[in-house]
Amino acid sequence: MRNKIVAGNWKMNKTLEEAQALTSELIGMIADEVKGNVKVVLCTPFPYLHPVNQQLGSNKRISVGAQNCSEHDAGAYTGETSVSMLKSMNVPYVIIGHSERRQYFGEDGKLLATKVDKALAALLTPIFCCGEPLEIREKGTHEQLVKQQVEESLFHLSAEALKKVVIAYEPVWAIGTGKTATSQQAQDMHAVIRKHLASKYGAVAEEISILYGGSVKADNAKELFACADVDGGLVGGASLKSREFVEIVKAI
Ligand code: PEP
């Protein structure tokens, strides 16, 4: 059975006070309303990881996640955060290769492979993002590109290591645009990714959780999550509002 995961990516939003208010609302609402074994991950800005983690305490269902990590272990890298820092703060998840990191910070497949390695070595779970921009979708080469992204950053891993990775397929044209992939488009690409993993790792591919991201909302989550190869979501804008996010979590 693959893990069902709904991760919220808060990006660069909220003051500390707002972040803590959202966290306490989520703790209460999720305890009261969410059944089953879905895991919820709150990917907060770096400064809020520790306070939000303190608020969560020993919460079994909700964890924190970082939105990025350094490819370096330690040293003179002003402004960066290493995986060992995250580990020392008991942060179990880290998003790697979000399209905004690829686009605005020039992160490429090779660099992301190093970040995946660092995260795994520190026993963090990487949420590895892949997805095509609009022009590639329009050209019809989206499957090829996403397979290449997966290959470049994950195919060097052993099967044992791959089992510890979560993948998020996020078509760039659907991120923050209000334009969601149809459930068919999502399912098709998730199946392509799983088949590609199977071509190298065999049955292990069946154990990998693949999340969909791109304008997931309370009113489209159910249909997306019903797809056979969609194991949850990576949610941006809608994760900033407690009611909306909890409805998405409940949709799984
Ligand atoms: C994201 O940031 O990963 C994302 C999917 O954003 P949104 O849900 O706002 O499209």
Image (cartoon, rainbow, N blue to C red):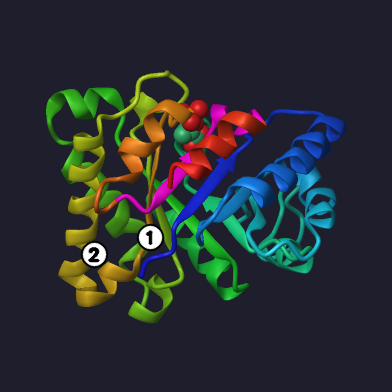
Q: Which range is magenta?
A: 230-241
- Pointer 2 residue: 197
Left or right for 61, reference 207: right
83 or 33, nearer to the observer: 33
208 or 223, nearer to the observer: 223
Left or right for 173, reference 66: left
Q: Label for residue 209?
A: 1
- Let me know if residue 107 appears in the view: no
96 or 235, nearer to the observer: 235
Left or right for 68, reference 132: right
Indicate yes or no: mark 2 CB to ligand 1 under 8 Å.
no
Q: Residues within 10 Å of mark 1 (few under 14, many from 20)?
A: many
Is 226 located above or below residue 70 in the figure? above
Residue at image position (64%, 28%) is 241
Q: Which quadrant of the structure image shows residue 243? A: top right
Of badges 2 and 1, nearer the viewer stands: 1
Say what amino acid the circle numbered 1 marks. Ser
Mark 2–mark 1 distance (CA, rounded to whole Å): 12 Å
Which quarter of the rendering shows the N terminus?
bottom left
Task: Indicate the position of residue 134 as horizontal and vertical percent values.
Answer: 28, 24
Numbered-mark total: 2
Q: Which quadrant of the structure image shows residue 220? A: top left
Say what amino acid the circle numbered 2 marks. Leu
Residue at image position (68%, 52%) is 31
Task: Indicate the position of residue 198 as horizontal and vertical percent values.
Answer: 19, 68
Q: Are marks 2 and 1 in contact (CB under 8 Å)?
A: no
Is 175 located above or below residue 205 in the figure? above
